[in-house]
Amino acid sequence: MITFLRKLFIKNYQDTNSPKVREAHGILASCGGVIINLILFAFKLVIGIITLSMSVISDAINNLTDFFSCIVNLIGFKVASKPADKNHPFGHERIEYLSGLIISFVIVACGLLLIYSSVSTLMEGQSEISINIYTFIILGVSILVKLLLGLFYRGLGKAINSVSLKAAMQDSINDVIVTSFVLISSIIQYFYPSLWYLDASVSIVVALFVLFAGAKMIKETSAPLIGVRPEASNVLSIKEEVLKIDGVIGVHDMLFHSYGPTKVYLTLHIEVNGNLNLFSAHDIADNVEHFIKEKFSIDATVHIDPIDVESKEYQKLSLDLKNVLLDINKDFTFHDLRIVKTHGGNRICFDIALPIDTKCDKDKLTQDIKTKLNGEYKDYEIDINIDDNYM
């Protein structure tokens, strides 16, 4: 069904890396949400006023906040699709993250409002509630419609990997749970009218649930703005594919920079045979950049590290260094290993990559490695650089 709707309303719907196609997906999702939430709000508000049910009115307000969230989403997708300009050379796609964050704050505000209203009702004392059959009908239909809307958001959000649509999907699922609580309490109160406090009590429980969900969504939607580590599977996939390219011996120092779902930039170092001429090495770097752009839709910048792979001295040193690091910590790796021989003396240079959460004295680590190597390489000056492995 979702594929059918995408075909019907979105031109070139499969080209999800296109800002215009992403915008069309967002507009489709937002317009659906605007219409449905406005209708549900109107019906629930009328039923809530007629029956004097605090929980039904609160649920109606919840739908009203969803309506405004869809408006924010709509604006977010329109702005995010704007092309790059002089002041924003990487485009405007991060607006999607901001719109998702705004939705999360709206959900929290809704939860706080529901708590305030429900507590006020309880403090005022016994209230008269007139639950009728229309209450059950509108709440039951609301649960079904919100479930379908959540699946609608999920399908579109998955298609374009949208943080804000995933947030909207979670909000719809929360609404299903919220309205289910309201429906159950309404049924109980219909048969036991003396339980006047049940309506407001259920509203408080629902509000706490909404608050928790909103706080969780704030954390999830703000993460891309702060900067998160890319999926390990994606990093590994790129590294494995690059290593298959002719002339590439090793890959390291991969750094991803995201400016939106489709605006990802990558810098990486590749190791090549140091005996190649400069033009051949540069050609390998170009091949890597073009390959990553074609296969992964990522703009890459490649740095070349020459390795003297034909030297037996290098091969022995590489094996010795590997054993030294295994003895210290199996998670430590090295790269950019080279032996530099000049009239001023001989040097061994390399970088040590540490996992990002490693806690150690880097000066002591450097000294330990030098001590373990100095026995056999005492005639060399050892130059060590410590890297954080962000991947």
Image (cartoon, rainbow, N blue to C red):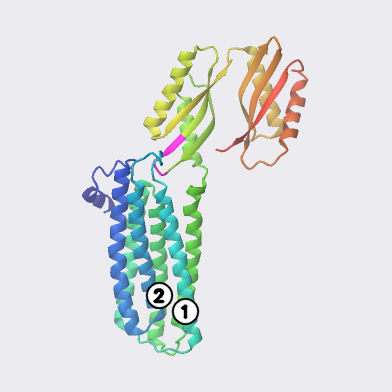
Check whether the beta carbons of the residues at disc 2 and disc 1 lie within 8 A of each other. Answer: yes
Q: Quadrant of the C terminus?
A: top right
* Furthest residue toward front: 86
- Which residue lies under the disc numbered 1? 118
Residue interval drawn in magenta: 260-265
Q: Earlier in the sequence, mark 2 or mark 1?
A: 2
Q: Compared with residue 119, is residue 375 higher up or lower down, i.e. above or below?
A: above
The residue depicted at 38 percent of the width and 39 percent of the height is 86
* Furthest residue toward top: 343
Task: Measure the C-alpha gap from mark 2 to mark 1.
Answer: 9 Å
Q: Is residue 251 left or right of residue 143?
A: right
Disc 1 marks a residue whose amino acid type is Ser
Q: Is residue 317 visible?
A: yes
Disc 2 marks a residue whose amino acid type is Ser
Residue 370 appears in which quarter of the rendering?
top right
Q: Is residue 246 visible?
A: no
Are there few (<14), some (14-19), or many (20+) residues within 10 Å of tag 2?
Answer: many
Residue 39 is one of the magenta-drawn residues: no
Are there few (<14), some (14-19), or many (20+) residues within 10 Å of tag 1?
Answer: many
Q: Is residue 134 left or right of residue 339?
A: left
Give 152 or 284, whichever is nearer the viewer.
284
Q: Quadrant of the N terminus?
A: bottom left
